[in-house]
Image (cartoon, rainbow, N blue to C red):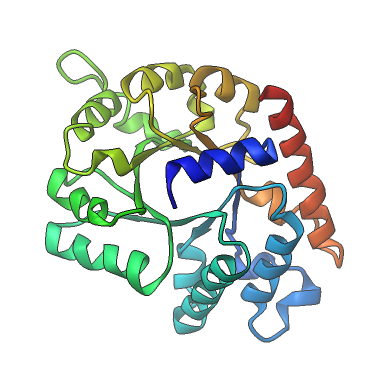
Amino acid sequence: MTIQSLTEQIRKKSSFLCVGLDSDKSKLPSCVSQQLEAQFVFNKQIIDATHDLAVAYKINTAFYESDGSEGFQALEKTVQYLKEMYPDHFTIADAKRGDIGNTSTHYAKAFFEKLPFDSVTVAPYMGRDSIEPFLQFEGKYAILLVLTSNQGAYDFQTLNTVDQSLYETIIATSRTWRGSERLMYVLGATKSEHLSTVRALAPKSFFLVPGIGAQGGDLASVFHAAANEDVGLLVNSSRSIIFASSGDDYADAARTAAMDLQHKMKKLL
């Protein structure tokens, strides 16, 4: 997928919503939890109910890997379903990978060749040669963890180096890497006071912004601090959408929750 086509979808739908499929099996509604392939059945219903309101879906791989081969099969079927039925949606493997170069190459092949994801989240701690393998695939993107929404982000990410914080150093350095035009950045909605700084450092990049909904981030604050002329935002909401109801109406409730966010996004746009 190209950035142009993603931007066109945002404009067409008046939405920059990314639905997070953090489909914890222990939280699935009872009406689906006992079914065969319960995670995939649940995901399929959520996707079908929200596809016209969202432009992206993010699959947190931990909720699938923890169930071994059965979970991996659900992950694979989910992303294949998205590509077959809704190919205009941007897909994100929230896997937070990052290792030495030859290992990262295999991670990249797993998500971009074996699985048809458009992007994968990656950790920058090991530097250039751990990230560049993800940037060698045309039409694929690496989403760099920069300023995350969790409280522990303050342990390291906002520490000052010589003349700027660590997260600012990461962004500035990453712009020099080969293939950096295919970099995106993870920025937590709960850190909205820093978003304008990040936008100044990466004026044309897309930001994946978790933390709206269950974590308490403010949508309007994020938009006004970080949107650019192409919008440049994918705001993710997971639990507050997919687990909006634990009853038989879970898909309808997910649609209602997604529609509420999309309406707010339309007003901001």
Residue at image x 45%, y 83%?
A: 69
Residue 154 locus on image (x, y percent): 37, 29
Q: Residue 110: x, y in percent? A: 32, 70
The foreground one among 116 and 249 is: 116
| Image location (x, y in percent) of residue 244 | 77, 52
Q: Is residue 30 visible?
A: yes
Residue nearest the viewer, comparing 30 with 263: 263
* Above or below for 124 versus 252: above
Please say if 132 is above or below 261. below
The answer to whether 15 appears left or right of 200 in the picture is: right
The quarter holding residue 236 reads top right
* Residue in view at x 68 percent, y 23 percent: 268
Answer with the quarter of the image where residue 41 lies.
bottom right
Query: Where is 106 relative to 137, above or below?
Result: below
What residue appears at the point 71 percent right and 50 percent down from the top-left corner? 241
Can residue 235 be seen here? The reply is no
Quadrant where the image shows the C terminus: top right
